[in-house]
Image (tube, helix red, strand yellow):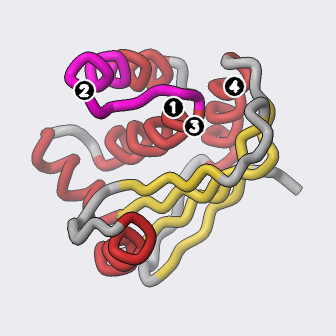
Amino acid sequence: MTNIRFFTEDIHFTLKNKTKIRQWITATIHHHHKQIHSINYIFTSDNYILTINKDYLNHDTFTDIITFNHSSNPEQIETDIFISIPRVKANSHQLKISFTEELHRVMIHGILHLLGYNDKTTTERQEMRKKENHYLALRF
């Protein structure tokens, strides 16, 4: 059984290339000298992720991703990553890129947060974007 799993909540969605995505995510994490305990990607509706945002983060806004770090060991990744498929679709249209490209960017964005990258300041956002682009280029 793999330690990177994919689920859906309140939406019908099928992720393509699961094996290659697992390999890509694993390579990214190993590049940072960390191990995977468990990664759960949960693909959701806007309303589902909005409820999570309100209940757990006290934010009353739609978002494309929420990452929960469950690890007590700094050398391991243990997480639930919630991704709103409608937000990713809307963002891909706005950015004029493919849905798959934007989905992969959001997926690696959550992992990069767990690897210690932040995006609160302009400088951090620029560094995060550089890292996203770097790892997107290493995809399958």
Residue identifier under label 3: 114
Lateral position of residue 27 relative to residue 113, left or right: right
Of mark 4 and mark 3, the one earlier in the sequence is 4
Q: Nearer the viewer, mark 2 or mark 1?
A: 2
Q: Quadrant of the C terminus?
A: top right
Q: Observer-nearest residue: 98 or 134? A: 134
Asked whether 137 or 36 is in front, the reply is 36
The amino acid marked with disc number 3 is Leu
Classify the position of the N terminus by image quarter. Answer: bottom right
Mark 2 and mark 1 residues within 8 Å of each other at the beta carbon: no
Which region is colored magenta?
115-129
Labelled disc at residue 121: 2
Residues under labels 1 and 4: Cα distance?
12 Å
Tell me how far mark 2 sits from mark 1, CA to CA.
15 Å
Residue bearing mark 4 = 27
Disc 4/disc 2 C-alpha distance (Å): 27 Å
Instruction: Point out the tag, 4 or 2, that comes first from the N-terminus.
Output: 4
Residue at 31% from the left image edge and 73% from the top image edge: 50
Q: Is tag 2's residue or tag 3's residue first in the polypeptide sequence?
A: 3
Relative to residue 43, is residue 90 drawn left or right?
A: left
What residue type is disc 4 on? Ala
For label 1, the SS is helix
Which numbered disc, 4 or 3, marks the residue closer to the eye?
A: 3
Q: Which mark is residue 112?
A: 1
| Residue 75, quarter of the rendered image | top right
Q: Nearer the viewer, mark 1 or mark 4?
A: 1
For the residues bearing labels 2 and 3, Cβ distance under 8 angstroms: no
Image: 131 above or below 115: above
- Give the residue type at disc 2: Thr
Helix, strand or loop for disc 2: loop
Tag 4: Cα neighbours inside 10 Å, few (<14), some, or many (≥20)? some
